[in-house]
Amino acid sequence: MNVLEVKNLTKRFNGLTAVDRASFSVEDGEVFGLIGRNGAGKTTTIRMMLNIYFPDEGEVLFKGEKTKQNFKDFVGYLPEERGLYKKMKVIDMLLFLAELKGKKGNQVLKSAMKYLERFDLADRKNSKVEDLSKGNQQKVQFIGTILHDPDFLIFDEPFAGLDPINTNLLKEIILEMKQKGKVVIFSTHLMEFAEKMCDSIAMIDKGKIILNGKLSDIKSKYASKNVSLSYNGNISFLQNNNLIESIEDFGHSTGIRLKNYNTDQQLLKLLIDNNIVIKKFNVDEISLHEIFVSLAGKESGDVQ
């Protein structure tokens, strides 16, 4: 069941189109990744979803109804630009953020302390926010985002600036949210994180959605372009073959890159028809990064 539907969202600034008819849907209880290079339109799309920006065209439906101005009040939202009151104590900041969402009392305090301990910040609960490092401030803001226990969470580049230990902790908590049946949407330019965590993705480039759907379906569709081959015989006949993009000899095996997806069975038949003794024929899984580069081109230095 689709809990959120984004339909043809478009946003222009001073005549320039930042997001161009973006459409995708998010199912109940899944982790959804909005992925793409920096400046692709991820943050603008999220802000339109939350009615922070009003779209020039299109609409957002939540559980079948068009979202209202107060939609963001029901969402745990971690913005790309972190915003905390620098002079407040950490614990007071967290309780204040929870109260803004209608939660207060001893249970909220207990939850805040639990998360502070988990993020190794319990001893800094009475420190002023301004006295924390940027990484620790980011952890405080993340705790503030989830402290009121929302069923719908949106994180904009949540892993930016975190060290590997805290990155893993963040991933762990996000997956725990999924296990509790919550909907999690996060944006990232880090394809590896999306690949490991997401059930579904929408890939955006230059303001346009260039790919979206279930990650398993996407990987299946694009999987069969790389083949690892071990064999006896002479495969020189593959040179300049219309199926083949490139051939690399790795000594113990040969890597074959196909020009088109899902042509691996044609390659296998060609090898058999030419009396090649096949010891190994593995179709290698393609990464999201490779898919992005193949669709968006090689101008992707800030995509990892």
Image (spheres, rainbow, N blue to C red):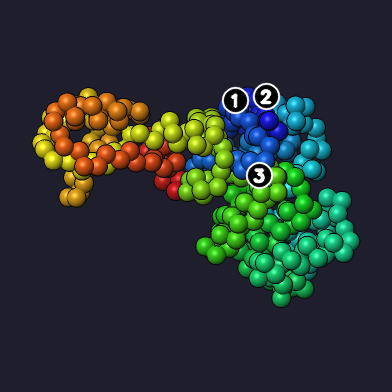
Which of 286 and 100 lies nearest the eye of the viewer? 286
Q: Earlier in the sequence, mark 3 or mark 1?
A: 1
Residue that numbered label 1 is attached to: 21
- Distance CA(mark 1)–CA(mark 2): 7 Å
- The answer to which of 217 and 16 lies nearer the viewer is 217
Answer yes or no: is residue 60 visible.
yes
| Cβ–Cβ under 8 Å for marks 1 and 2 | yes
Sequence-wise, the earlier of marks 1 and 2 is: 1
Instruction: Give the percent coordinates (x, y) of residue 122.
Output: 72, 72
**Residue visible at 19% across and 29% down in the picture:** 272
> Residue at left 68%, top 37%?
28
Q: Residues within 10 Å of mark 2 (few under 14, many from 20)?
A: some
Relative depth, front residue between 277 and 208 = 277
Observer-side mark, 3 or 1, equals: 3
Residue drawn 81% across the image and 65% down it: 110
User: For the residue marked with disc 1, what is the amino acid?
Assistant: Arg
Dot 3: element: strand
Amino acid type, residue under disc 3 in the picture: Val
**Mark 2: amino acid:** Gly
Which residue in the protein does label 3 denote?
A: 184
Residue 84 place in picture, x, y as percent:
73, 59
What is the number of the mark on residue 82? none
> Mark 2 sits on what residue?
58
- For the residues labelled 2 and 3, say whether their Cβ atoms are less than 8 Å apart: no
Residue lying at 55% horizontally and 47% vertically, measured from the top left: 197
Toward which corner of the image does residue 181 lie, by quadrant?
A: top right
